[in-house]
Image: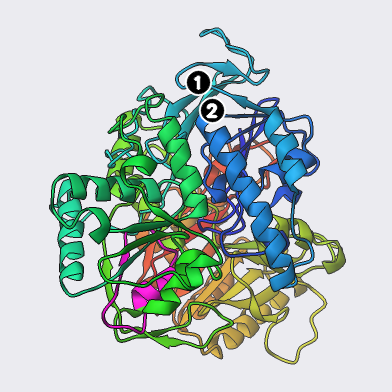
Amino acid sequence: MKFINLTRRTEIGANSYYLEIGRHRLLLDCGMHPKNTGEDALPQLKAIADRGIEAILISHAHQDHIGTLPVAMRRFPRARVFMTEATAEIGSVLLHNSVNVMTRQREEIGEMSYPLFTHRETDRASERWRWCPLRQRVSTAGERAPQREKDALTFELFDAGHVLGSSGIFLRAEGQTVFYTGDVNFDDQTIMQAAPFPEENVDILIMECTRGDHAKPPGWTRAGEERRLAEALERAFERGSGVLIPVFALGKTQEILAMLYKFRRESRMYSGPEFPIYIGGLSSKMTGIYDRRAQMTRRQLPRLQLMREVAPFILNDETVRDAPLRARHVYVLSSGMMIPKTLSNVFARRLIENPQHSIFFVGYANPESPAGLLRDAGTGGEVALDPEKPPQRVRCNIEQFQFSAHATREALVAYAKKFAPKKIVLVHGDPPAVEWMRATLSAALPASEMIVPPPVVCLQETKCPDGQFPALALRAVGYYSACHGEKSYNGVAILAKAELRKVRPSLCDEVVDPQARVIAATIGDTRVFSIYAPNGQAVGSTAYEYKLLWYRRLRDCVAKEKSRDLVVCGDFNVAPEDTDVYDPDLWHGAIMASEGERAAFRELCEIGLRDTLRIHHKEGELYSWWDYQMRAFEKNRGLRIDAVLASDALAKRCSAAGIDIEMRKGKEPSDHAPVWAEFLDE
């Protein structure tokens, strides 16, 4: 199986995943980034431009999962598109709204590539969508598939409990099984019921990580959180406050409306005209779909008709600017992230400087979004909700509640543990969330392989001049890069999910060295060296003396670095100790194991670098290089000549390190296996 995460970074953005199982190629979701614009709002579809897509499967209709589907359908015109019927109805409305937003942004921000697709294209695209019922095995031809079909690619949708129409996708093809959770919730919400996901064994689990960096509070229950919200509203009403609740138009709006309906029915607070509720135009359309499908879908309160029973007032882009901001009114407005120009953003700027009023956050907000910035600023802080407007002092009351439509991290781990898949691919999460999930699942399921795109990759023996390095292709899959190459077997590079700064394709002395063996760059606060040390050829040779001199130059260069967090990694062409050689007696005094080379390596480490592998693995037959001859790899006759060295400060945060021997088993592999190390944030 081949998997490519087409999301541009480790984040919740333009979510999309390419999957190749045998001869079958498909796309899981095709979202739009909630903050980026233009080409940067798209998934990295260019990375698979030359691959024919058999099918596109959509998990649900949130913008970050369906928002650029018409673009994908244009680029892959033969691909069949599948989703639930509810997702199709919601998705059509949301995509037409997106065209309106992009058309307006073309004028407001000068994004001339907008709209990325038109109303007509959206209509034509939606006519090609195929609706699939839940729990029915379907082929990519759109036909009901036999239960014992082995060769054809089949899929089955399971209710994900996230929003109306959301589904997890179970794939079967050529003896392999893959399950993609999409966005899932294993707890009942006010409307949506908990996901009844399959628990059969699966080879590969592709799992979301949205809440991976937030522990479930002790004693938290949804019923208790609903009571807390009701009590907070009562307090706000008693002091004459109007309350803004930023929400997503799909899902969160309907959940909050259902809660407010329950509060009224239970006589917890003011009813009738004393408790008016306002929502946006798009939210009203989504709520209408929820109402029409109330008794057709698996949900709580199946007879509740929100638009009739709650009877909210409707605001639009014009009326929101002069709508009455009054006491004992509740404004349930999108977007949940409070993106500039949206109803919640415009309305918030009217009330945040007024200590009488309140803003209640009820779900996820990207820390860099206006909602995240406002939430973190809190009462007394200062925030600019719109980059075109000056900052404002936050004087209103700010409160937070947990009504996430995503599964808790504890529930996600418990689900994975039920069947211990061979591989777990972690997606849809910010870096701290993904890292917590990776570390926790690695400890809980040591036999399962965790797959997370590494934030930094260092390459050696790139064997190409700089002009031939595939920088554009790497950028297309989310990596910035810097290279230092030549036509021979030398060459080094650094790839990173974050931008590279202070790139230096040489050692820091004045020596002119024709061999491309080192490149350094700063990534965040960490200085990274990717090195390919000389081989030395034979002890005592001119090449050997060059190697020892090169090591001294490297040591002097690294010693001058001021960064507290420092990494020097790559092919050192030295086995530092006898434990790093399969047969110490045979290799005694030989090239790559001579005392002169080992002394040079030790002197490099003595300036304040630690071998991260030896932090976690004190001994054992751990090798990173095997000769191609004499079946050396099969017999494990190897050397450990590759390493990740880290400064003392960074080494203290090294949570794991290892050698990926599986990579050495592939077709036409390198004679090296990748070495890796993981570090915790401070």
Membership of 461 in magenta stretch: no
- Residue 473: image quadrant is bottom right
Residue 398 pos. (x, y %): 28, 73
Residue 340 pos. (x, y %): 54, 71
Front residue (pair 309, 607): 309
Callout 2 crowding tier (Cα within 10 Å): few <14, some 14–19, many ≥20: some
Quarter that holds the N terminus:
top right
Q: Secondary structure at mark 2?
A: helix
Query: What residue is disc 2 on?
Result: 85
Which residue is depicted at the point 61% across and 83% down? 552
Residue 583 pos. (x, y %): 51, 49
Callout 1 crowding tier (Cα within 10 Å): few <14, some 14–19, many ≥20: some
What numbered label is drawn on residue 297? none
Residue 626 can be seen, yes or no? no
Q: Is residue 431 left or right of residue 555?
A: left
Could you tell me the amino acid type at mark 1? Answer: Pro
Membership of 363 in magenta stretch: yes
- Residue 330: image quadrant is bottom left
Query: What residue is disc 1 on?
Result: 133
Q: Secondary structure at mark 1?
A: loop
* As drawn, 66 above or below 175: below
* As drawn, 645 above or below 253: below
Q: Earlier in the sequence, mark 2 or mark 1?
A: 2
Front residue (pair 18, 375): 375
Stretch in magenta? 352-376
